[in-house]
Amino acid sequence: MNYETRDTYGMYKSHDNQGPGPRLMGADTLIGNDVYNHKDEDLGDIKEIMLDMSSGQVAYAVLSFGSFLGMGEKLFAVPWSALTLDTINKRFILNVEKDRLKSAPGFDKDDWPDMADRSWTQDIHAYYGTRPH
């Protein structure tokens, strides 16, 4: 499912076409969006968007990977800056190999990490090759 499908307010009916999509987007319309890599492999979908309340920036997208009917689901906090919006296919692109994602630091839906912990943040950004905001 993509952001245009979940647009209950009509906010994406028109935009200025100055970028790869709308310049502002509702977080709720992004939850559930598919995530693929550059090899066109399905990496999962976005389950949650985490906001840094002190800076007002989006910090992470929580990606679900490896689930079949909700079984065996592993969650990953992916730095927002590691994702690119693919407006043609209405999905996000994460530049990571599927096998590398399988070994990425993840967590269980019932045991979330402390995403505000600085050492955890540094480890996640190092894994995806991004810089903390």
Image (spheres, rainbow, N blue to C red):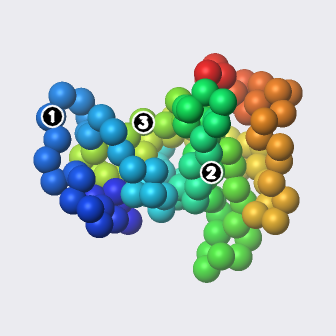
| Quadrant position of residue 86 | top left
Q: Residue at x 18, y 28 (%)?
A: 18
Q: Residues within 10 Å of mark 2 (few under 14, many from 20)?
A: many
The CA distance from mark 1 to mark 3 is 16 Å
* Foreground residue among 51 and 17: 51
Amino acid type at circle 1 is Asn
Q: Residue at x 33, y 39 (%)?
A: 24
The correct choice, above or below, for 13 with respect to 72 in the image is above
User: Reading the chain from its start, which is encountered first: label 1 or label 3?
Assistant: 1
* Tag of residue 62: 2
Amino acid type at circle 2 is Val
The image position of residue 67, as x and y in percent, is 64, 69
**SS for dot 1:** loop
The image position of residue 128, as x and y in percent, is 65, 30
Q: Which residue is mark 3?
A: 84
Amino acid type at circle 3 is Thr
Q: Which residue is mark 1?
A: 17
**Relative to residue 4, is residue 128 drawn left or right?**
right
Task: Name the quadrant of the N terminus.
Answer: bottom left
Q: Is residue 100 visible?
A: yes
The image position of residue 77, as x and y in percent, is 68, 44
Q: Residue at x 85, y 27 (%)?
A: 119
The CA distance from mark 1 to mark 2 is 28 Å
